[in-house]
Image (cartoon, helix red, strand yellow):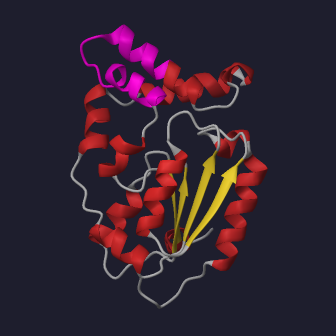
């Protein structure tokens, strides 16, 4: 079984995966040799500028602690919007994802998207050459891919871009082969280094 060191060599941020920023904020020297942004925001403060109208339309319901029906309907619509063809998903997959979203209360949803986070170390590492893979579906309903890429290009000087044609937010599910191939290609060129980024 791979060690923890193996997993921290290259960190995968998925969706609201702003954890690489937390790692670099709190661990020094930088333990990462690369970051993958798979349909992901780079840090919390960027959230508002990178959401799509679809995502913004559902947010009030997803953080509503007063209207249970609105909250649950918003969760279902959000989960269905993550996939290219949610109506074609096996019921077990769709119900599992909707069920997982129910574990997070509206107050927890607010906290996960508004907690304090300092991206200074993330940006400094990016400017020092920390390798990044930006992996994004062209049909992602929740994350504005072009705007996200523009922001990442101001932060990282060593960025690889892979657009997944007709890929959804859940491209790892809908386009598994292409995602895995892209990840393996990136990982094969990113190795543990003594260089600090």
| Left or right for 43, reference 176 | left
Q: How many circles with numbers are drawn on the protein?
A: 0
12 or 167: nearer the eye?
167
Determine the residue located farthest toward the bottom in the rendered image.
194
- Relative vertical location of residue 40 with respect to residue 189 in this rendering, above or below: above
Residue 161 shown left or right of residue 40 in the figure: right
Q: Residue at x 70, y 53 (%)?
A: 179
Q: What are the residue bounds of the magenta stretch? A: 53-76
Q: Return the residue nearer the eye: 133 or 157.
A: 157
Residue at the spot 41% in from the left edge and 67% down from the top edge = 155
Relative to 164, does residue 182 appear above or below in the rendering? below
- Point out residue 146 in the picture as x, y percentages from the top left corner: 53, 49
Image quarter (top left, top right, bottom left or bottom right) of the C terminus: bottom left
The image quarter containing residue 49 is top left
Residue 154, percent from left and from top: 42, 66
Q: Residue 95, located in which quarter of the rendered image?
A: top right
Q: Is residue 105 magenta?
A: no
Q: Position of residue 84 (x, y in %)?
A: 68, 31
Where residue 39 sits: x, y (%)?
Answer: 54, 48
Give the quarter of the figure containing the N terminus: bottom right
């Amino acid at each position: 079984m791979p060690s923890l060191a193996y997993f921290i060599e290259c960190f995968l941020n998925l969706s609201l995966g702003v954890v690489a920023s937390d790692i670099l904020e709190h661990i020094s020297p930088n333990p990462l040799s690369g970051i993958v942004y798979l349909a992901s925001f780079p840090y919390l403060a960027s959230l508002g500028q990178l959401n799509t109208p679809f995502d913004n339309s559902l947010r009030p319901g997803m953080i509503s602690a007063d209207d249970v029906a609105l909250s649950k309907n918003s969760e279902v619509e959000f989960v269905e919007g993550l996939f290219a063809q949610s109506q074609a998903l096996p019921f077990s997959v769709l119900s599992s994802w909707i069920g997982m979203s129910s574990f997070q209360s509206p107050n927890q949803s607010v906290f996960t998207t508004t907690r304090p986070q300092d991206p200074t170390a993330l940006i400094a590492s990016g400017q020092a050459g920390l390798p990044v893979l930006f992996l994004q579906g062209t049909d992602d309903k929740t994350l504005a891919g072009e705007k996200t890429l523009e922001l990442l290009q101001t932060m990282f000087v060593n960025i690889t871009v892979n657009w997944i044609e007709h890929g959804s937010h859940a491209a790892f599910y809908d386009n598994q082969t292409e995602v895995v191939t892209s990840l393996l290609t990136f990982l094969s060129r990113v190795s543990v280094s003594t260089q600090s980024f």
